[in-house]
Every structure is written in C-alpha cells, then in structure tokens.
Image (tube, rainbow, N blue to C red):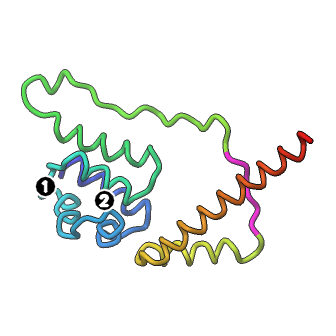
Amino acid sequence: MSYLANAISDMLEEHNLKSSDLAKRSDLQESQVSRWKGGQQINIRTETLVKLASGFSSRPTDHAKLLYAHLKDACKGPGAKFIKIELSPADPAPNPPPSIVLPPGIKEDIDIVASAAVNSQVIRALLHNTAQVSRFRGNLIEDLTSAKGQN
C-alpha cells in the first residue's frame, strides 16, 4: 500500500471520519478519496492535496503528514535512496491561547453544531457570519476601551 493510502487511513481514524465525510469536507469525489485510501492511485495534484488536507483540519501538522506521504510515494527511481524525507517535530506554540472555561452544557452544544456543520452549508455560513460579528464586536470593544483610556 502507498504512503498516502496509509496516511489517509490513519488520519480518517484519528479524526473519526469516513471517506464520504472527508470527500464532502474536501469538496472531492468520494470515489477519488476511496482510490487514494485504497492505494489504487497515488498520483495527486498539489491543489487537490491541499483540499484533502483541509478536509481533515486546518492544523499544519495534518497537512504535513499528507505532504510527507505524497513525497515518500513520489521518491522512486535512480537516486531515490540518496533522498531523505522526514517530518520535523512540531514546534510548540510560542504563546498558547488562554484556556476558556465554558458554562455547563455549552461544550456539548458546540459539538452538536460542529457535527451538523459538516453536512450543512447553511450552518457553516451561519457559523462564519457569527464569527465575523464576534470578531468585529471584539475589535470594537478593544477600540472603545483604548480610546477611553486615552482621554
């Protein structure tokens, strides 16, 4: 089996996804995802690899796992034994985000909405718009607070 097939299989399990879920999230054909997962096809365009990685998550380490597998599959032929492809350890975040304590029940609500967003473009759009409003509101509050302190 190919490195890419193994990486996809491992990451599907890690993210608790099915091939059909990944296909929807990546905006790819389910049959194509199945061919990569089954090792029937190892060729993949860069743009498609990016879509596939984004279907799993936005974490750079997930993207690196797929790119690593793709490069390992591509490293064949004369001279391949002189090529070394490796993943470097993930750099820890310089300033980890502050821990957020959610009121009881909110985490479960967020998980339910996140699950529904996988299959619903409407819910994704609502979440996006809500995030935009929250960002705007946060920036506005910061601006007002700093303006008040300058007076």
Residue 146: x, y in percent?
Answer: 83, 44
Q: Which residue is mark 2?
A: 9
71 w.r.t. 39: above or below: above
Name which quarter of the figure residue 95 lies in: top right
List the single residue furthest toward the right: 151
Q: Does the segment drawn in magenta span residue 98?
A: yes
Marks 2,1: beta carbons within 8 A: no
Which one is closest to the eye, mark 2 or mark 1?
1
- Which contiguous range is marked in magenta? 97-102
Q: Residues within 10 Å of mark 2 (few under 14, many from 20)?
A: some
Q: Which residue is mark 1?
A: 41
- Which one is in front, 69 or 137? 137
- Which one is in front, 100 or 10? 100
Q: Does the segment drawn in magenta span residue 72?
A: no
Q: Earlier in the sequence, mark 2 or mark 1?
A: 2
Q: Residue at x 27, y 50 (%)?
A: 49
List the single residue furthest toward the front: 151
Residue 128: x, y in percent?
Answer: 53, 66
Type of the residue with mark 1 = Gln
Name the main secondary structure of what is drawn in magenta.
loop
Dot 1 falls on a residue whose secondary structure is loop
Name which quarter of the figure residue 137 lies in: bottom right
Q: Residue at x 17, y 34 (%)?
A: 75
Q: Residue at x 72, y 56 (%)?
A: 138
107 w.r.t. 100: above or below: below
Residue 116: x, y in percent?
Answer: 48, 78
Name which quarter of the figure residue 135 lies in: bottom right
Dot 2 falls on a residue whose secondary structure is helix
Residue 1: x, y in percent?
Answer: 18, 52
Type of the residue with mark 2 = Ser
**Of the numbered discs in the image, which one, if any, rests on residue 138?**
none
